[in-house]
């Protein structure tokens, strides 16, 4: 009986340690560079960062901010745009949602996908940054 309790305690401890916690380190922003034809996104994190790059005027908005947004991908096995851990991705301007020649800046939404204890994946650490285009 004592061995079963120790085993149950050990399994519960391992399960809790394996899950992400609210005290996990937050994501750092992607480093963005532009060269006139593409964005270069560098991921300083040790996990993949999902992203979407859009013309900020492409989304419905109000004086209080964006009122309509794109659905964030939460399936890590999908082909959703992402930058692998400590990697770099080049995004041609043509792949920016709502891009047009002369667009002055782009809004990049980035997030991390984490698994809940239920097994469901969710978007966390959602952050926004604006990058000027040249």
Image (tube, helix red, strand yellow):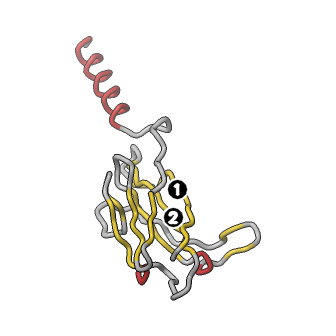
Residue farthest along the right direction in this orientation: 63
Q: Residue at x 47, y 60 (%)?
A: 110
Give coordinates of residue 40: x percent, y percent.
39, 67
**Vertical comparison of 19 with 89: above or below:** above
Q: Residue at x 42, y 71 (%)?
A: 39
Q: Residue at x 45, y 63 (%)?
A: 32
Residue matched to label 1 = 126
**Rendering quarter of residue 81:** bottom left
Find the distance from the CA under tag 1 to the CA under tag 2.
7 Å
Residue farthest along the bottom direction in this orientation: 101
Q: Are marks 1 and 2 in contact (CB under 8 Å)?
A: yes
Residue 78 horizontal side relative to residue 99, left or right: left
Mark 1, secondary structure of its residue: strand
Q: Earlier in the sequence, mark 1 or mark 2?
A: 2
Residue 82 horizontal side relative to residue 24, left or right: left
Give coordinates of residue 83: x percent, y percent.
35, 61
């Amino acid at each position: 009986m004592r061995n079963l309790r120790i085993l149950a305690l050990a399994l519960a401890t391992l399960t809790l340690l394996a899950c992400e916690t609210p005290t996990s380190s937050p994501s750092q922003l992607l480093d963005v560079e532009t060269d006139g034809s593409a964005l270069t996104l560098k991921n300083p994190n040790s996990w993949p960062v999902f992203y979407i790059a859009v013309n900020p005027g492409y989304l419905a908005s109000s004086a209080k901010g964006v009122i309509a947004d794109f659905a964030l991908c939460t399936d890590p096995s999908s082909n959703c745009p992402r930058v692998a851990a400590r990697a770099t991705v080049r995004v041609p301007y043509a792949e920016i949602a709502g891009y047009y020649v002369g667009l002055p800046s782009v809004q990049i939404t980035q997030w991390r996908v984490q698994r809940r204890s239920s097994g469901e994946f969710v978007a966390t650490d959602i952050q926004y940054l604006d990058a000027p285009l040249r």
